[in-house]
Image: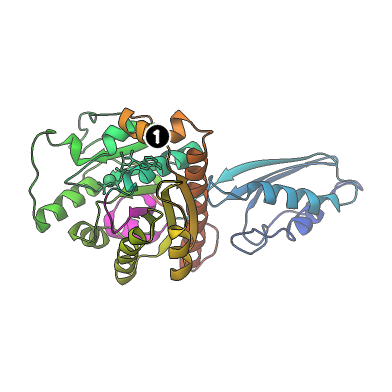
Amino acid sequence: MFKRKENEGGVTETAVMAALANVIEPELHRDLVSLNMIRNLKIEGSDVTFTIMLTTPACPLKGKMEADSRAALAGVPGIGQISINWDANVPADRRIKDQLGQSFRNTIAVSSGKGGVGKSTVAVNLAIALAQTGASVGLLDADILGPNVPMMMGVEQMPPPRNRKMVPAENFGVKFISMAFLVKPDQPLIWRGPMLHSAISQLLSDVEWGELDYLIIDLPPGTSDAQLTLAQVLPLSGTIVVTQPMQVAASDALRGLKMFEKLDVPILGVVENMSGEFFGTGAGEKLASDYDTDYLGSVPMDANVRLGGDNGKPIVVAYPDSAAAAALQDVAQKVAARISVLTLNKSTNFIPIEMIG
Ligand SMILES: Nc1ncnc2c1ncn2[C@@H]1O[C@H](COP(=O)(O)OP(=O)(O)OP(=O)(O)O)[C@@H](O)[C@H]1O
Ligand SMILES: [Mg+2]
């Protein structure tokens, strides 16, 4: 694959690639060379430059991969400066394109059996945190009857349609769409199953989403029609379950989790939200371990989280250095990593990653 270019007694491509073949991608458990993650290798004299092509720009283990690569290359005789660049190509869940015709590489629902636990808050901050890493991200407010996303994202109107398609609103690097854009705030929505079904399908299909690495979906509370509808109209790459830290809340979350399991949707993990003195802590971790899924972390109760939602400036934007924002950024990285592993394991070719679109 790489042309053997001997370099006057200096460093050779063969030696560099042989060294990098000993570096293991920590999530995928294979070496960087057989995963085809080493690109644009250039050798000038004793100096080496290359790009590591990640499966998500939100990769949590870049630091480890860099350190391991440098350590492996230190063993190459005569090696000089090592420069590592980063790029990412998010693998695509092909079912989405096949079924919906939209170029979403992955779809991630944020769910819970219970209302008011912070699904929308987590969905909004997760979407922004992924976009902050450089991913292209969309956010679908699938809470047709109680849409909150536009207020939390600080945008109350969507742009005019183009080519008879809706154009999503955009803020903080995230494209989003919501029923709130289409109904007056004081207009009650009393809808039945089939109408919910068509509303959700339209917000997916009749929108110029463009190419997205991740579509995040904010679900309504409960285990109702909306969840079933979504699983029918859109293949879900996975769902994350939000719970409050008390045991009673976790039992509702467990109901939600079981429903997704019945629908054959992979559970990406559990986020505990609003932990701290008031509600305590621990139910999220217990739920994850009882259910044998990942514990994605706990987001502390913090008035700035609520204010961020009310004021349209979510915590990862307003206070990116706060503990709550750090927890949400960490959730984003863990989710992105899990999605990569799931999507790659599903496809028959490990990598090269297929481009969609
Ligand atoms: N970690 C937190 N600290 C403080 N307040 C929070 C936190 N997480 C969420 N909130 C606040 O709690 C309220 C409910 O959150 P949110 O709307 O995200 O929940 P939800 O599960 O989407 O609710 P619903 O079931 O109605 O859709 C909001 O006012 C939000 O700002
Ligand atoms: Mg909500």
Provide the residue span drawn in magenta.
92-115
Ligand 1 is within 8 Å of the C-beta of the residue at disc 1 = yes
Residue 45 lies left or right of residue 284; in this view the side is: right
Q: In the displayed structure, would residue 1 be above or below residue 10?
A: below
Residue 303 lies, in percent from the top left, at: 40, 34
Quadrant in the rendering for residue 4: bottom right
What amino acid is at disc 1? Ala
Q: Is residue 113 magenta?
A: yes
Query: Which residue does the image show at 11% across and 58% down from the upper left?
Result: 193
Residue 282 lies, in percent from the top left, at: 47, 58
Q: In the displayed structure, would residue 77 be above or below residue 258?
A: above
Residue, far right: 9
Q: Is residue 12 magenta?
A: no
Q: In the displayed structure, would residue 237 be above or below residue 90?
A: below
Query: Which residue does the image show at 32% across and 56% down from the upper left?
Result: 112
Residue 5 appears anywhere in the view: no
Looking at the picture, tell me which residue is in the foreground, 240 or 39: 240
Query: Which residue does the image show at 22% across and 29% down from the upper left?
Result: 157
Helix, strand or loop at label 1? It is: helix
Residue 130 lies left or right of residue 168; in this view the side is: right
Looking at the picture, tell me which residue is in the foreground, 181 or 321: 321
Q: Which residue is mark 1?
A: 303
